Image: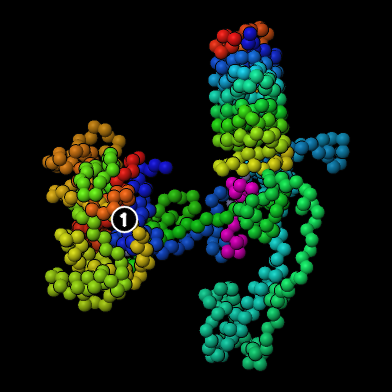
Amino acid sequence: MANLQITVGAVVCVEAEIRGDVRIGTKTIVHPCAKILATGGPIVIGDANIVEELATIENKSPEPMVIGNNNVFEVGSLVKAKAIGDHNIFETKCFVGDEISIGNGCVFGAGTKVTPSQAVPDNSVFYGQPLKHRLAGERPSAQTLQIDFLSRILPNYHNIINPTIKREIPALPAEKTS
Amino acid sequence: MSHLFQLDTVKYVCCCGSLKPICNVYFCRHCLRLRCHYCVSHEVDSHYCGNCSENMPSAEAKQKRNRCGTCYDCPSCKQTLSIRATTIQVPLEDEPEKLVAKKLYYLACGFCRWTSRDAGLPDSQNTSGPWAEPENPLAQQIIEISDYFRMLAIREKNSKDKKFVQKSKYLAAGRHGVAHLLPRRYPVSVPEEMSKPLPTPLYLAPTEGMEDLPELSDDVYEDELIIPKVTSLTQRLRQLETQPRETSKLLPTHKQLLVKRSLRCRVCERNISKPEYSPVSIKFKIQLNAYFHVPQIRLMTPLNEPLVPGRKARIVLRLANPTQFPTAIRFLPFSFVPLQKDGSTDKRALDAGKFDPTRESSTDHSLPSHTLTPTTSITFITPSMTGGGTLGSGESTQIMKEIHVLPRRSERFSQNCDVIPPADEIVLPPRDETSDFDDFAETPDFNDDPKLVPWRKANKAAVYLDVIRQLTDGSEPPVLGITIEYDYVNTIVALESKGVQEPQKVRLQAHLLIALDRIPS
Ligand SMILES: [Zn+2]
Ligand SMILES: [Zn+2]
Ligand SMILES: [Zn+2]
Ligand SMILES: [Zn+2]
């Protein structure tokens, strides 16, 4: 049975679409209309991440997808990576393929399509069309102020899933048959 | 990419023979001819920075190598860098236990996230830097070379004064900027001094070949190549002085200046486009784009199936009148004649001048050609029934001038469809800006034949045209060649003679090539 675990301190809007086994760490913000789809294995999201509107995180493989801390998934990004470390930024409308495991401090620029099969080195920046790859000197800083702001403002205008109630969310049709 | 004016579909043929969409051609109101950017002279009006909009006189721009002093470009991706601030805690000078916040600045690229810290530059206490500039290892040599040529130029100038006349090689157009440095009588200009050979600068020493090349160091073979750490060719060439191999050596580059330029008709030497001086202004003092003067033609309905040679098909064109005066458009078979130095145009133009019936009444033809301005000659342009066969004497001189002045582009094109010209003219009312926003504006009634004009709105109309494919190879995409003849009201004449003359109405022609198989946007 699929279930959703939200740690206290996380702000997850009711309008977000969350399916399958998903665990969300504290201080993580999930905006309305964001999608977290654990269609295959579970998705474990760490602390202080921001998942913006229309961003999609999907795990189709049976392996669990572990996402670290302080990552930002910007509007319209589609991320299917095997694993994600800390301090990564997925800019608007970027696409990250399902064969890639991401370390720390990587930036996937707006509109980029990144699908290499090997692991990307830390502090990589992907940008431009055609895709260019460079190594940054330092990783992007954490969005602490933004997270504080959002966790204060979002509950004023949206219904938030109460983390204390352990809930079971409807399982996927595919899982029902098995 | 689709474009409102169908950049690839409808091409206007400029008199030099280049094919351009309407938004890329100009219209000289004095010559009454289309001009493309090959047939105008381009002049730099002012230099300015596209980021901070600072204006710079051309001498200063030259000194600063056409770069802005305050703005920087990302050496990695060429975006403009922005200044970021960070705060750090530093101990006070007199009280080391007390910490105060201090602002530090660095440069950052919003696109590829390059920062001046990546280049190893320390943060600056100032928003304006200074940031490290690439040091040119060849700077000394360049100074030597330019000094050497300066000396040569001075000698040449002196020998000129002494009437040792030689063809100037080094003084050409004051290339080294020394003209102003030269006194009329230069003390060194004694013949003995002059004949002394100049010491050649070091760079001129002949290079020597090497028998044995030094071995490559081991790390070339052993170290793993990390592509993201190696600069690309464009990155290297952007930092011309050092051309670094490692991305860590890229330094911020000063932003390249932009220019405002004005365009001048090469035939009559009058301005065709002149921007306002201020870099912030996007307006023009003079802007004679064909777009504002020549009927705009778009393909509304392309062919829905391939056109077999010899067969007929129907297309729909959309006409629009951009001027403030009504116009009547007539369609004619394609009759563009390219400029030729010794070909038919030349001869025909002369012939036309000889047999022109209006010549008797003309007072212009006896004037030398440079006083004969095209504006006075336009009255001779008569509607040509045979596709530009009859030419006025004024126009013949103009064509003569165009032949000498304009470059001949004569782009290759294949025109394999002909129009079956409709008998009627299509009258278009003047442009009225308010009608574009008024959906219920009254459509003017011109008693159109619905078989010719199926739709009309304000200054726009659609026209059915029958086209026939020539009996040639049918494998090429169908291209319709068409000449339109339209009324143009020339307000320049009235302006120049201070209202004594009425604006003149002339009949002009434009030649178009329309690709028929494209989907209109
Ligand atoms: Zn031209
Ligand atoms: Zn600037
Ligand atoms: Zn950049
Ligand atoms: Zn002109």
Crowd around label 1: few <14 · some 14–19 · many ≥20 (10 Å): few
Front-most of residues B176 and B95: B176
Give the residue number, with chain letter if any, for mark 1: B414
Residue A159 vs residue B101: left or right?
Answer: left
Q: Quadrant of residue B497?
A: bottom left
Front-most of residues B40 and B45: B40
Q: Secondary structure at mark 1?
A: loop
Residue A153 vs residue B481: left or right?
Answer: right
Question: Residue, x 73% and y 74% (percent of image)?
Answer: B208
Residue B240 vs residue B125: left or right?
Answer: left
In the rendering, at what x and y percent does residue B22 appear? Answer: 34, 51
Please say if A118 is above or below A24.
Answer: below
Q: How is the image coloured?
A: rainbow
Q: Quadrant of ligand 3?
A: top right
Task: Look at the image and say whether residue B69 sits in the magenta stretch.
Answer: yes
Q: Quadrant of residue B160?
A: bottom right
Amino acid identity at mark 1? Ser
Question: Residue, x 53% and y 88% (percent of image)?
Answer: B165
Ligand 1 lies under 8 Å from the Cβ of mark 1:
no
Residue B38 vs residue B81: left or right?
Answer: left
Please say if A80 is above or below B504.
Answer: above
What's the magenta region? B62-80
Please say if B374 is above or below B83.
Answer: below
- Disc 1 chain ID: B
